[in-house]
Amino acid sequence: MPLPPCADTVTTRKARILYRMNTSHFGTDGIRGIYGKDVTDETAYRLGAALAKRGKILLARDNRLSSPILASAFLGGVTAAGGRFSFLGLSTTPALYYAFTHSDAETAVMITASHNPPDHNGLKVFDKAGKLGNDACRALEEEMQSISLSSVSYRTEREDPSLLEGYRAFFREAVGRLDGLKVAFDYAGGAGYVFRDLLPSLGAEVFPLGLSEKGDAVNVGCGALFPGALREETLRVKADLGIALDGDGDRILVVTKEGDILDGDAILYLFARKMKREGSLAKDKVALTVMTNGGVLHSLTEIGVTPVLCNVGDSAVTAAMRSEGLSLGGEQSGHIVLGDLLMTGDGILVGGMLLKMLRAGEPVLLPKELTVYPQSRIDLRLPDKSVAYAEATQAFAAEVKARLPRGRVLVRASGTENVVRIMTECPDAALAEACAREIRDFLLSRNE
């Protein structure tokens, strides 16, 4: 594959780039940031060289404009360190993970910025237990920093999409025939493009949105973060279901045929209810994060399902599932893990299983018995996001929470952006919004 033309954000073959690691590159979902600023070719090169010492590597990428050159830089690092690799090329993150778990590789790396804008990119790292945990990330960061480097070398390699055939066969077997179903499907301009043929191959009539091989507009006004166009298309074509992915295909958002939007909480409730009824919900528990809506938690307990709460991030969800021996988990954001099938979030697979439910005559609707408390959420960009955990901030958040009947307050630093995330929740929507703004103003006043 030829390298793309060099631009201001692209490291040239001969140029030396200063690599400063004053803070960790790793967040809750691997390395991520603006390409050429937070994530450079040297980042990828150093990561490749560090991982080469751990055995064979399986690499894949999304379709962002910067992904091919990051792949070349990563493979340059692997090669320089004497490592071995296989390169899938364009793939979703869950398909890479499936291929990895059925391979002899010791590590898998996905080049993607997931749901972030087109000018971002990043690298997700997996071992056989899933995404790397905090301790493993810190150790890897130190290895990257210790590598002596004067310039980045690149390696181009033929992509081998045949390595994805196992995932295709797995998907078809798990989902089965979908004849007669109409689906509006938003690919978010991202890596889901590579599997655009899967649902049609099972007999579904698909009305695509955000379908582009060139990821220059990934997540721009489309996909799981922007469901408006999908809702319109679902109603326009009278689809049985609308499905939206994010840029690397590990999230899902659903639009019902009535036009209701189902986020990860609602989708998890549907699966938990079905699996408990069928006796396939391990221990009658589901792994959820602290962002899960309080009303949804109450609704789950009402049907005899016990929530197991963990930190934000699908890696935290899968860790909780493995620790507790659970078969279902996920996040409000749309990472849904069907553990009996694949121990990672997979938007296409989850969408396929919802369509399978429809094909079997079970409606996919917003459950009438599901309680959802209003939430107000503010993403506040600050120079130092660690202020979220300052004693004064948490004390003020506790004061606000005391005024919320049956409410919750969560103030945390984003794991992938320089942002403080504020979430307030209670049955009174106006009160939740007012309290979120109050916390925002408090943080701004301390950063003047």
Image (cartoon, rainbow, N blue to C red):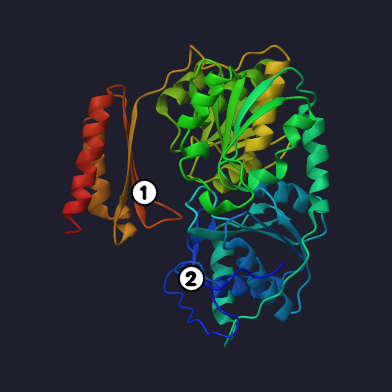
Residue 175 on image: x %, y %: 76, 28
Residue 397 on image: x %, y %: 26, 42
Which-is-in-front pick, marks 1 and 2?
A: 2
Mark identifier at residue 9: 2
Left or right of 171, for residue 206:
left
Residue 338: in sight, yes or no?
no
- Observer-nearest of 59 and 307: 59
Give me the residue at 54% from left, 84% from top: 15
Measured along the vertical axis of the image, is residue 380 above or below residue 8? above
- Observer-nearest of 285 and 33: 33
Residue 300 on image: x %, y %: 52, 21
Using the numbered discs, state the Cα–Cα distance from disc 1 to disc 2 in whole angstroms.
Answer: 30 Å
At mark 1, the secondary structure is: strand
At mark 2, the secondary structure is: loop
Give me the residue at 73% from left, 31% from top: 199
Left or right of 384, for residue 180:
right
Measured along the vertical axis of the image, is residue 32 above or below residue 434? below
Q: Which residue is mark 1?
A: 412
Residue 325 on image: x %, y %: 67, 37
- Observer-nearest of 360 and 423: 360
| Callout 2 amino acid | Thr
Quadrant of the drawing holding the N terminus: bottom right
| Callout 1 amino acid | Arg
Measured along the vertical axis of the image, is residue 125 above or below residue 364? below
